[in-house]
Amino acid sequence: MKKIIKYANTETVEEFLANFDTYVKYIKENDEEGLETIFNKETILDGNTEFNYQPLITEGIYSDTDPKNVEILHRSLHMLSPVQASQEKFWLGMTMTYCKDYLYYRLNDELSKNKDERIKTE
């Protein structure tokens, strides 16, 4: 299924990083309303590139699903340049839209054990 790439504007990336401790609470509590205060139609924008969207695997053991998810991402986003693929605004926009289920899946252990420092590095 074709989708448009999403990205966060620069101010949103800076706000998220500067106030991570505030926003991590919303992630930990799966508080969509709280997340909407920073990730919304004004702050998460459409790019000018379509990609072939395929949902990431969000169940199973990480050692099994991580390599499969890398393959899914590579197939879906192969058209991106290294510069595009390395931008925080791209990954933040995609994570908070198409990949939010994956975010919760991949951080499940850290979220349940209140490992905020580990969450910051993920």
Image: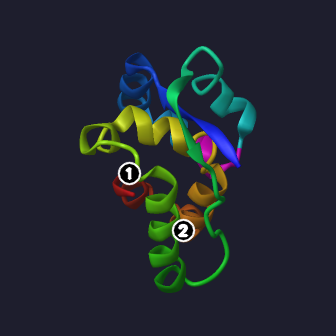
Under circle 2, the secondary element is loop
| Residue 33 found in image quarter | top right
Label 2: few (<14), some or many (≥20) within 10 Å?
Answer: few
Provide residue 71's location: percent of width, then percent of height. Answer: 47, 69
Label 1: few (<14), some or many (≥20) within 10 Å?
Answer: few
Determine if the magenta segment contains residue 12: no
Provide residue 81's location: percent of width, then percent of height. Answer: 30, 42
Provide residue 93's location: percent of width, then percent of height. Answer: 51, 35
Q: Nearer the viewer, residue 106 or 31?
A: 106
Location of residue 54 with respect to 38 vertically, above or below: below
Residue type of the residue flagged with mark 1: Lys
Extent of the magenta region: 25-30
Label 1 or label 2, whichever comes before in sequence order: 2
Q: Nearer the viewer, residue 51 or 42?
A: 51
Under circle 1, the secondary element is helix
Residue type of the residue flagged with mark 2: Lys
Task: Please tell me the numbered disc located at residue 113.
Answer: 2
- Residue at 73% x, 37% y: name it: 32
Q: Nearer the viewer, residue 37 or 9?
A: 9
Location of residue 116 with respect to 93 vertically, above or below: below
Quadrant where the C terminus sits is: bottom left
Magenta segment, prevailing SS (helix, strand or loop): helix
| Residue 89 found in image quarter | top left
Q: Which residue is mark 1?
A: 120
Determine if the magenta segment contains residue 27: yes
- Residue at 51% x, 76% y: name it: 68
